[in-house]
Amino acid sequence: MAAAKRNRETAAGWAYHDGTKHSFRSVRDNVHFLDWPNKPLPFKIYTTLDPIGLPREVPPLGMPALEAISRRAEANSDAIPDLKDLAQILYYSGGITKIKRHPGGEIMFRAAACTGALYEIDSYLVCGDLPDLEAGVYHFGPHDFSLRRLRRGDYRGLVARATAREPSVTRAPVTIICAGTYWRNAWKYQARTYRHFGWDNGTMLANLLATATALNLPARVVMGFVDEDVSRLLGLDTDREAAFSMISVGRTSQPAPDPPAEIGRLAPETEPLSPNEVDYPAMREMHAASSLLDEDEVRRWRGALPERKKPEPQERLIPLKPFGDDEMSSEGLGAVILKRGSTRRFDRGSSLSFERFSTLLYCSMREIPADFLDAGDGAAAAAHLNRLYLIVHAVDGLQSGAYALDRDGRALELIRAGEFRKEAGYLGLEQALPAEAAATIFFIADLNAVFERFGNRGYRAAQIEAGIIGGKMYLAAYAQGLGASGLTFYDDDVIEFFSPDAQGKSAIFQVAVGKSAKRRMEVV
Ligand SMILES: Cc1cc2nc3c(=O)[nH]c(=O)nc-3n(C[C@H](O)[C@H](O)[C@H](O)COP(=O)(O)O)c2cc1C
């Protein structure tokens, strides 16, 4: 029997969201503990497929990081990546950039921040013949910096069909598909992991989009596709894994061949992640309820985007003052990604200049090429799904207090003046980071409007958008000698804090920014 279309049954989306909220009570009532001997492997390792090594000697990415996150590459002619370009894209979005050893073993940190350093998102490539890579479907293994071929042949037509012929995918020589493995993150975060898929995939995509821009390759995030067709192509075990996003990379005038009528089942063996896996059905339920079942549903999902609301009246607003091009940090993207990390302690005594803070906000809110934000035809982008609310503790020239960023990302509105370090610490699950940072930034979405427009699938889009902007904030902070950390939060308390402005909306994500305590001591 064919599965029923459920994307419009938004009670399922609300049930997942409400059921995975954190509160003062919920964290105290939760008896979950970290079962260290059962900690999952942070890699998907195919045991029977041969590695195809990626080139390790690649030129550094010299484009200033702030420019790379603020722009998108446009291609009027063919832009075909080669293996060296793909190696850079995969390395700077998901590669191992740092290894830290500790008495119990080692942690391999990656290019983008990830909740709990559990790295549950994998990248796959679907490409036609490239100058130095045969057409096929490949998995990227960061553990040995290699590709493994899952299918030989050109399957781009199948991917294009799964997106209802989304124009950028249809013309792409390569599409990267990201998929999450529930258990790799749920070991620690239980059913909240489905939200983390969006955040952790989003930080990777911030790096990926910036890297593509630095390589002059157009790239575009596509969230609307027929889930089952994509899972089958990648050979995903859908009880354990879920395809979450797609990114078209490059442009070709050679049309993808028609997809084959049938594709064989794929189930290559992989190493077990841990002795036992625990299933959290709420996530599979949310994934099923936000799945699109056929091309027609995808086409309608993408549909016409809502009109951008008129800009708000400027007189109440404090305009941001980002640096001009000649004053901005020119540190290259590659160097910034390599030094990025999550700040473990902020220097409470340091403040940020308004220009640096403005630059961080301004650059992070620019250019997100995505099917849920623009039609890809040069038409004006729709408003972001998330709005930014801030608690500012120490930014020169800005009164301490609660603010909202206007929809264009160009000005701040003071909601409430006051010293809110204690409140910020509480809202961030009682952690010191948001209390000691110079400012902490909350991503808040009107989920009623998101569900109305996009159905349950909009939930995936809202989470990944927050992750992308948050990932850009990491890069904008590190490019300017600052630190940043993603953060979790007490959902309803965040909304209450920013109400009445945020009333009826939902907390999606949080990022704290400021001077890192360690970094300052090193400089002195
Ligand atoms: C979405 C997100 C949420 C995070 N939440 C927290 C948090 O609540 N507390 C914390 O100390 N670190 C948090 N982090 C930081 C991660 O622990 C960190 O990214 C991970 O350990 C990898 O280290 P790295 O970012 O230094 O590479 C978060 C990171 C992300 C991306």
Image (cartoon, grey):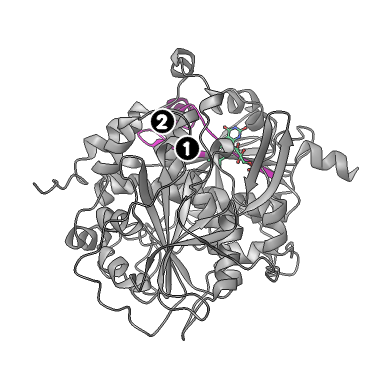
Question: Which sits in the foreground, 149 or 512?
Answer: 149
Residue at the far right in the pictured view: 524
Query: At numbered mark 2, what does the secondary structure look like: helix, strand or loop?
Result: loop
Q: Which residues are magenta?
A: 483-509
Residue 70 visible in the shown view: no
Residue at the far front in the pictured view: 48
Residue shown at the point (88%, 45%) measured from the top left: 523
Label 2 neighbour load within 10 Å: few <14, some 14-19, many 20+: some
233 vs 123, left or right, is left
Residue 410 location (% of width, % of height): 55, 56
Amino acid type assigned to the residue bearing label 2 in the image = Glu
Mark linked to residue 277? 2
Mark linked to residue 273? 1
Q: Is residue 245 above or below residue 30?
A: below
Label 1 neighbour load within 10 Å: few <14, some 14-19, many 20+: some
Location of residue 395 by image quarter: top right
Location of residue 491 by image quarter: top left
Label 2 beta carbon within 8 A of ligand 1? no
Residue shown at the point (74%, 69%) measured from the top left: 326
Query: At numbered mark 1, what does the secondary structure look like: helix, strand or loop?
Result: loop
Q: Which quadrant, please, contains the C terminus? A: top right
